[in-house]
Amino acid sequence: MIKAILIFNNHGKPRLSKFYEHYSEDTEQQIIRETFHLVSKRDENVCNFLEGGMLIGGSENKLIYRHYATLYFVFCVDSSESGLGILDLIQVFVETLDKCFENVCELDLIFHVDKVHNILAEMVMGGMVLETNMNEIITQVDAQNKMEKSEAGIAGAPARAVSAVKNMNLPEMPRNINIGDISIKVPNLPSFK
Amino acid sequence: MALKIVKGSIDRMFDKNLQDLVRGIRNHKEDEAKYISTCIDEIKQELKQDNIAVKANAVCKLTYLQMLGYDVSWAAFNIVEVMSSSKFTYKRIGYLAASQCFHESTDVIMLTTNQIRKDLSSPNQYDTGVALTGLSCFVTPDLARDLANDIMTLMSHTKPYIRKKAVLIMYKVFLKYPESLRPAFPRLKEKLEDPDPGVQSAAVNVICELARRNPKNYLSLAPLFFKLMTSSTNNWVLIKIIKLFGALTPLEPRLGKKLIEPLTNLIHSVLSLFIVKYLGLLAMSKILKTHPKSVQSHKDLILQCLDDKDESIRLRALDLLYGMVSKKNLMEIVKKLMLHVDKAEGTTYRDELLTKIIDICSQRAYNCLWYISILVELTRLEGTRHGHLIASQMLDVAIRVKAIRAFAVAQMATLLDNAHLLTGNTQRNGICEVLYAAAWICGEFSEHLEEPMATLEAMLRPKVATLPGHIQAVYVQNAAKLFATVLRGQEGAPADSTVAQETSQLLIDRLPLFVQSSNLEVQERASCILQLVKYIQKLQQKDVEVAEEVTALFAGELNPVAPKAQKKVPVPEGLDLDVWINEPPSGSESEDEGRKSKGKAVFAKDESRHTKPRYTEVDEKELAKRREVRKAEQANNPFYIKASPSSQKVRRHSVSKPNPSPSFSLRLWMPMSDQYVKLEEERRERNKADKKKKKDKKKREKGEKGRRRRGDSGPESEEDITPAHMVDIVTEEMPENALPSDDDDKDPNDPHKALNIDLDNCPLMDYQVVVSVIFENKCDSFIKSMEFNVLDSLNSKLQRPDGAGPHDGLIVPFQLPPGISNEARFIFSVQNIVMPQKLKGTLTFIVKTDDSSTHEKLDFKLHFTCTSYLITTPCYSDAYSKLLESGDLKGCSLKLEGVNQPFHHLLARICFHHHFSVVERIDSCASMYSRSIQGHHMCLLVKTADQTVSIDAKCDEPGLLGNVLDEIKLTFSQC
């Protein structure tokens, strides 16, 4: 089971938090802070596993994380999950974000956390992995977005226009989380056939 | 109308949306909290409006604020409102917010049951999907119970998207409502072979989670999983299956052999350097459990990993070393670890290292001298949190191992003398906890002290007052014990009595410092003892010998008591604790009485510990007080130290005095443990030589002994190593007649315990049919106490609750006011599904009118058609053609004349009434598929031409096929 999924930037600012067990808001913030503290002090070239210990639920759990440009993607999982599997899942998650946002960058996550949640919901449900096939995920996400657009219909048009105007002067930030540069270090497991 | 909507939305577009909120927060970096609080006020206003779009927007913003740590549970009701919007856009926002902030104690969850049920059965698959996703995050036992059936139905939904979500969420439902596992399991098992890979993977996922906790119930699925493992191409599924086999193999050794080949293939393909080290260590720890020797040979490599810069790898290596320790290499490994303690950076890792060292030693150390010296060395660590752990280990060893006490006392005395080094700079330095143990050991076993006077002096230094209260309390109490020992020594000697009086004076001078302590415990003990010492001094001045009486205060030995001892005291026969033994108590006296008698039962040597009231009447009160103090101290002291597993292998040998070791005089900060390593080696050499000598003499005897030892020792040949000291390890006291039982260790709150359901011993479950009966009250009176009963046939039986007889009716769980209808579900188990059948039943109920109530009865028949045993199951055309090619199916055909309806209507009818699904349709020809609850495949080829419909059917059970075709015919004859 996945216990929690956290995304935060290099300064520890949360960009997405999804807890599959209930904690109070204060505890959640504390977990985010501690996780950031643990993960951020690690070198770039050490392994991506971290046995969390005190964090969520005790020593059975571990943290599996990847660092892309300005963002950390951290999954807290228990012993039933495979480390490699989760690393692969993070990669799928980021690639999916990249497809859905077209060259994803931190700003996309900042302003559209609801969309990120919707994408995540197609991959992980209640702490269990639902789908690992990127095409399938994107198909479902697109279909839902299309539905949303058709519901907005004519009434949504002015709101969209205003929103477009508001978005025109977003602060400039380096786009691209850079999934291309950091080559995928997780080997794809060959199939047995 | 349209204009109005557009106008409304133009008004709305100047509301803040999520992006505006985020932007606003980013622009108010200085006064973020203030800005957010004004935003929350705005949101509260928006939530008050009737427009659902405004509400949804507000809830969306709240979800973002929740991520930033703001409590938004106050908006729970609004979230439910947004969830129940008919628009998908808003519904999704509502469910997302709910999944982020609802939990079991959110009370509005009760209101959501019907909304969720409605969404689950929505024709729009994404409404259903969103509801399932949300539910997976906040499902409660009530929701699980109420919705289990709906979700189970969704597991056979035509859309794979819904199926996979429904399958996955079942695990959450099982956790909250374990009763649902048994009825849902057959369907879950069926989903392992679902044509859609996503559904398959979800089913594997769920079963793996279930099997991880209770593997033995899932052993029968092993062949199925093996097939999946060799056929699946989905890595995710493969990983899960391998994990599952990891849980199953210990239960079924034959599995191991079969698995080797596919697993080696997998391992060979993993070649990523930076993870491999970690995974390699992980794998080694698995291997260690079964083949310890093969891992032992890599010891040096593992020790090297302790130097890795990556903490995760260091911790893994540490874990591995912990498992590898044996009697032979214990000292060597611990020595290496001690080196690492010095070098280790970062307190987390160092603390982990420390606990591991203690863990290793506490379970395996047989050379206690060495262990104590290791513990003493560990006290050098500054800033560790584990002072308490070290202290408790010191106490544990000193109490259990009699032979070690002299040595331990000497070490502790040195510790006390150097206490200033431990307390050092700060109060929060955890290591000062060891002084607690040191003081207690020195006091309790003070007869072993070489220079009790010096230790007494050390314990009464003014600096002690800076220690934490509970440690000071132990200091004071044990100073009194020491005092008794010192007095005895001094009075025994022929020297003049002034020395003894000076000792008393020392206490009288120093104790007032503690009497002023702000800690109640310290204060109370100090003032008691101060008074006692003053009185003793008075006696001393009259030349009375008091040493013996003072020593008597602390007579009696403390034995460790097993942690479970209290629980295991058997209740004497005829004892009823609820009955008054005497009349209700008049005062506190009887309470005291009760406590004493309890004490006697548990602590066998209790009486001997109390002082004989030899003292004069003046002291009567003080002694009583002191007794209380002592009792209080007992409650805090190592009496209750938890047993370490070493007590399991107690060896009882005759006591022999430990050789007074030269290290007694060593300075504290020199690592002494090294010396013991050397001593140990020498001793082993000697032992070997001795043995050789004795060999001829005691050949027969030794042979016998050796064999016995080998039987109970670990994987290594340890018969060469004898314990360093003939040790009398004190066993824990247990009450007489204690019953052996180990089951009290399990956690009763583990949710997975409830899921430990044997799924194989229930052969009927494959053939269950749920009958949903709608009761409608058409009369004008109130109907209650309905009882539903069916006359079971050999083939079909109504499932009744456990303990009910075969003819008992089932109570319908509701009452019906006039004109109301409600639905109840009953489960039937069916053996044979080939024939349709009718069951006779009766419904009894009470009709209640204003003035009377009458008992009435209604007879009915339940018709189980063969169609009702079919489940709509999708099938891919290639699987379908394979099925037809296989030749296992037998054919049958049917012709319907004069059917005057479009072809797609006709197909829809067959799908709806007879639970088929269309595999492929070409013009006026279609292939259809369905499956029975017992797994029979049924294929139809439907063709139409000129109002004639011909159906060619194939099935592996001809009887069933014939009956289904008859039923299809009947359907069309009725239209």
Image (tube, coloured by chain):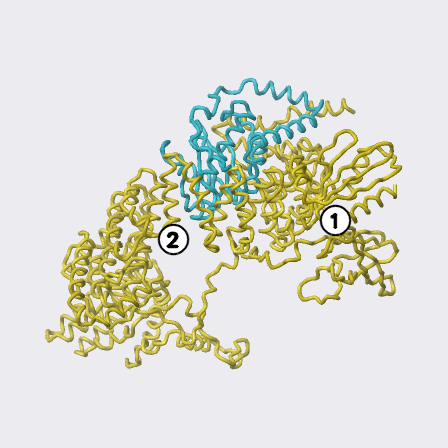
Chain colours: A cyan, B yellow
Q: Which of A149 and B255 is in front in this view?
A: B255
How far separated are the C-alphas under marks 1 and 2?
Answer: 52 Å
Horizontally, residue A2 falls left or right of residue B391, namely right
Residue A147 in percent (x, y) is at 67, 29
Q: Nearer the viewer, residue A164 or B786?
A: B786
Residue B36 in percent (x, y) is at 54, 32
Mark 1 Cα-neighbour bin, 10 Å: few <14, some 14–19, many ≥20: some
Q: Residue at x 35, y 39 (%)?
A: B277
Horizontally, residue B471 falls left or right of residue A172, namely left
Task: Identify residue for label 2.
Answer: B290
Is B756 rendered above or below residue B953? Answer: below
Horizontally, residue B659 falls left or right of residue A79, namely left
Mark 2 Cα-neighbour bin, 10 Å: few <14, some 14–19, many ≥20: few
Residue B728 in percent (x, y) is at 27, 69
Mark 1 residue type? Pro
Horizontally, residue B642 falls left or right of residue B507, namely right
Mark 2 residue type? Thr
Is B348 rendered above or below residue B818? Answer: above
| Quadrant in the rendering for residue B854 | bottom right
Earlier in the chain: of badge 1 and badge 2, it is 2
Is residue B830 visible in the rendered image? The answer is no
